[in-house]
Amino acid sequence: MKKRLKLCEACNEPFKWDDDVILVEDDVYHKDCVSLYPMGYFAMLDDEPLGETENDDGDEAFNHLDDDELEESL
């Protein structure tokens, strides 16, 4: 029994063995068929994953914490 070729979800063309592909959940696309946008960064601590973040450069603590959660500045 012959297998059915997997097709790109965008262009419906079959994949060649050396095509660059993008996996999105269970769907496969040719890399050239989709646009990729960097939407965040993945934070690690001692080689353990913490999760995704969008503030790659950090941000001032007062933007995210209440006054009673911060140490007073001198």
Image (cartoon, rainbow, N blue to C red):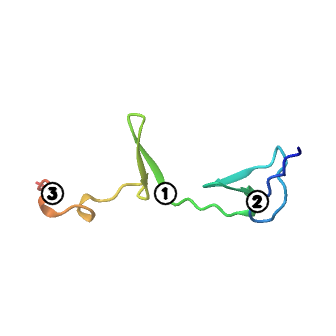
Number of dots carrying numbers: 3
Q: Between 8 and 53, which is closer to the camera in this rendering? A: 8
User: How many other residues sit within 10 Å of disc 2, few (<14), some (14-19) or many (≥20)?
Assistant: few
Q: Quadrant of the C terminus?
A: bottom left
Lower sequence index among marks 2 and 3:
2
Q: CA distance from mark 1 to mark 3?
A: 26 Å
Q: Quadrant of the N terminus?
A: top right
Lower sequence index among marks 1 and 2:
2
Residue 58 horizontal/vertical position (percent): 36, 55
Residue position for label 2: 32
User: How many other residues sit within 10 Å of disc 3, few (<14), some (14-19) or many (≥20)?
Assistant: few
Lower sequence index among marks 1 and 3:
1
Q: Secondary structure at mark 2?
A: helix
Q: CA distance from mark 1 to mark 2?
A: 21 Å
Which residue, as the protein is rendered here, is positioned at the far top? 46
Q: Are marks 2 and 3 in contact (CB under 8 Å)?
A: no
Which residue, as the protein is rendered here, is positioned at the far front? 1
Residue position for label 3: 69
Q: Secondary structure at mark 1?
A: loop
Question: Which residue corresponds to the image point at 56% horizontal and 59% vertical from the top-left?
Answer: 38
Q: Is residue 52 left or right of residue 5?
A: left
Q: CA distance from mark 2 to mark 3?
A: 47 Å
Residue 12 shows which numbered tag?
none
Question: Which residue corresponds to the image point at 43% horizontal and 59% vertical from the top-left?
Answer: 54
Give amino acid for label 1.
Gly
Residue 40 shows which numbered tag?
1
Give amino acid for label 2.
Asp
Task: Say above or below: 33 vs 23.
Answer: below
Give amino acid for label 3.
Glu
Question: Which residue corresponds to the image point at 81% horizontal and 63% vertical from the top-left?
Answer: 12
